[in-house]
Amino acid sequence: MASIILHHFAASPFAERIRLILGLKGLTWQGVDAELVMPKPRLKALTGGYRKTPVMQIGNDIYCDSRLIALELERRYPTPTIFPNNSRASCMALSAWTDQDFHMTASGLAIGVNKHLMPQSLIDDRRSFFGNALNVDGLQNDIPHLRTQLRAHLDIVEQHLSDGRAFWFGVQPSMADLQVYSSIWTVRSNLPFAESDLSPFPHVVSWETRIKSFGSGTTSEITAEDAIKLARASTSTPVTEVDDADALGFAAGAVVAVTPTDYGCEPVVGRLVKLTVAEVAIERRDADAGTLTVHFPRIGFRVSLLSR
């Protein structure tokens, strides 16, 4: 089996989720330091334009979005599970809160508090990346409001853990723990007042320690150029699976664009090879990386027909 390659950067909360899954499952993987600002030519050689991190590469299969990456890791390495007691649906539903309101609060604070330390190129990139989803230019003035929002989110977590449970669903860790933890990790990693804002929530603080103990598995670093070469050398071909009942009515082989619907809305174009209730995958060719299959979740992504 081809090795797991994670394209990520250290400060990404969504990448931290995946690193923790790799640790929880005791997996060995290779890491590539992803480019931080656009145009990201090495990452785009693999994704075709998708700009978010993390991205997981296994051979010439490229997996975008941390939710889909988590599901693929669970499919390939089911033990120990990240969905104990049939909790997959609950974890996916929880992401509507953790990946939007909670994430935007934590990231807004991280940018607002540290904006004066950021190079202009990064500020410009974050402005373009978030668009209307986050007012990057107004974040420094919004810090008091965002701290009230953080307190409210932390109170939800504290109340949920207040019965003494070890993890979100009880005695076993799950994807839900990692989804909730990633925003708290952002706060802890980036805010000088993190300790004072977190200390009133003792159940959260002790739970944090348990999550940190998962580690990140066994990892080594490779270059983006080496990852691209490994993709090109892969000989795997996608199995076509297009749901005839899908409301879009697209056929296998149609040229489509897949675009995130929240922010970082860069389309990826290719020939449709998979369209199921949960996943869309396209085949595309890159001059350096060769023929690739790029996978996305259905939720949060629009699939548009370009030609039949």
Image (spheres, rainbow, N blue to C red):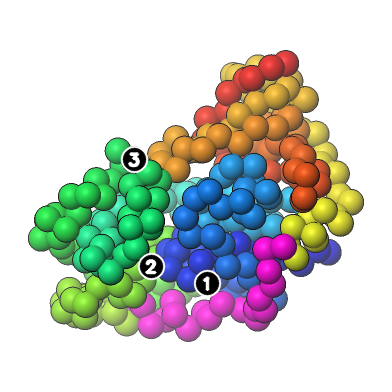
Q: Is residue 218 magenta?
A: yes
Label 1 – label 2 distance at C-alpha: 10 Å
Q: Earlier in the sequence, mark 1 or mark 2?
A: 1
Residue 144: quadrant of the picture: bottom left
Q: Amino acid at mark 2?
A: Tyr
Give neighbour class at mark 1: few <14, some 14-19, many 20+ (Cα, 10 Å).
many
Residue on which disc 1 sits: 20
Give neighbour class at mark 2: few <14, some 14-19, many 20+ (Cα, 10 Å).
many
At horizontal 33% and vertical 47% (from top left) the residue drawn is 127
Q: Amino acid at mark 1?
A: Leu
Q: Earlier in the sequence, mark 2 or mark 3?
A: 3
Q: Is residue 124 magenta?
A: no
Residue on which disc 2 sits: 181
At horizontal 39% and vertical 51% (from top left) the residue drawn is 125
Which residues make up the magenta segment?
207-225
**Labelled disc at residue 164:** none
Residue on which disc 3 sits: 131
